[in-house]
Image: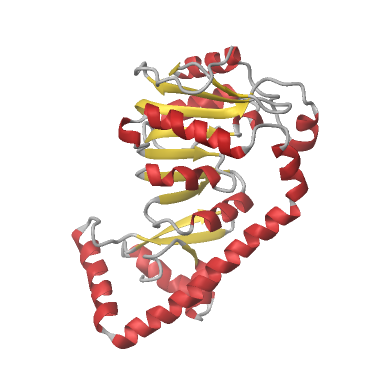
Amino acid sequence: MRLLAHMELAVGELAQVLGQSQPRVSRHVRILCDAGLAERRKEGSWVFLRAAIGEDRAPPVGAAAAQLLSAAERDDAGFAARCGEDRRHLAAIRAARQATAEAYFARHAEEWDTLRVLHSPDEPVEQALADVLAAMSPGGDLGTLLDVGTGTGRMAALFAPHSRHVTAFDKSPEMLRIARARLQHLPPDSVELVKGDFTRLPFADAGFDTVLFHQVLHYAQEPEAVLAEAARVARPGGRIAVVDFAAHDREELRERHAHARLGFSDEQMLALLSEAGFAPAPAIALPGRPLTVKIWTAVKDGAPAPVQLGTPAR
């Protein structure tokens, strides 16, 4: 339970840290989950665990259990030593995750570099996106953020300090493992990684203050269905931001990189957002060579349009 208080762990990782067999750990995990002290989440063939208790969380018995465990580590030298040893093993697992992520990027370096030289550098796009989201959000607080198609977790990491909670969502288990390595420094109760399809978001209605699509929507065969799902899970007055390519003719992106759409025109995107139930604002254009990146923003249910920043699209 002290390990789970620090980060979400797979059953196999927990067994590795504790030096116990996986069946034995699984049996104890089942008892903890049945008692409501831990929570399980399946992601592909992996099962991940997180603590369901905390000193500032309900129910009271969970808060009491967390306080007891904290006091035990503080007052019991033997228990504290064991916790410290296990955390060192946990640090080794974190290092292994990072090494796996770096190896993955090394294997795909040519593909990533080819895509990046086609549009603006990351930094100006990210700064413009941060500026417009801050202008749209009271006090700069993004509230509960859903990062659809999180990929490597770059956007989730960028906006986590400005959000109460981040849900990093992706269809690829490999990408989610990379994102987990990038996000593992964040408090476990501030971020959640979820696997699924963006045409059928596994979330309740009106659950998010901000929904973000960063270089994702061009993979959608039916972007109208994807944005309709985004509208369903956004709260009234909630914000949406779509970062994607302006319409282009680079057919090789469809052939080599599985792009379903060769960017979007302003007319297309504004129609898509309006039909989904959002009130769009003017787009922001960030010209590149040869592709231009656009940032389209909108609010749900006719809330006031966001403040316009950057260069309006022609």
**Residue occupying the point 44% across, 72% down:** 27
Residue 113 spot, x, y in % from top left: 73, 43
Residue 7 spot, x, y in % from top left: 43, 62
**Residue occupying the point 54% across, 70% down:** 93
Query: Dividing the picture into quarters, in which one does residue 1 lie?
Result: bottom left
**Residue occupying the point 53% across, 16% down:** 312
Residue situated in front as seen by the camera: 309 or 201 = 309
In the image: residue 247, left or right of residue 50 = right
Quadrant the C terminus occupies = top right
In the image: residue 257, left or right of residue 298 = right
Query: Dividing the picture into quarters, in which one does residue 33 lie?
Result: bottom left
Is 264 rendered above or below residue 253? Answer: above
Is 158 rendered above or below residue 199? Answer: below
Is 235 rendered above or below residue 304? Answer: below
Residue 28 spot, x, y in % from top left: 41, 73
Regarding residue 234, the answer to whether it shows in the image is: no
Regarding residue 208, the answer to whether it shows in the image is: yes
**Residue occupying the point 50% across, 76% down:** 89
Q: How many marks?
A: 0
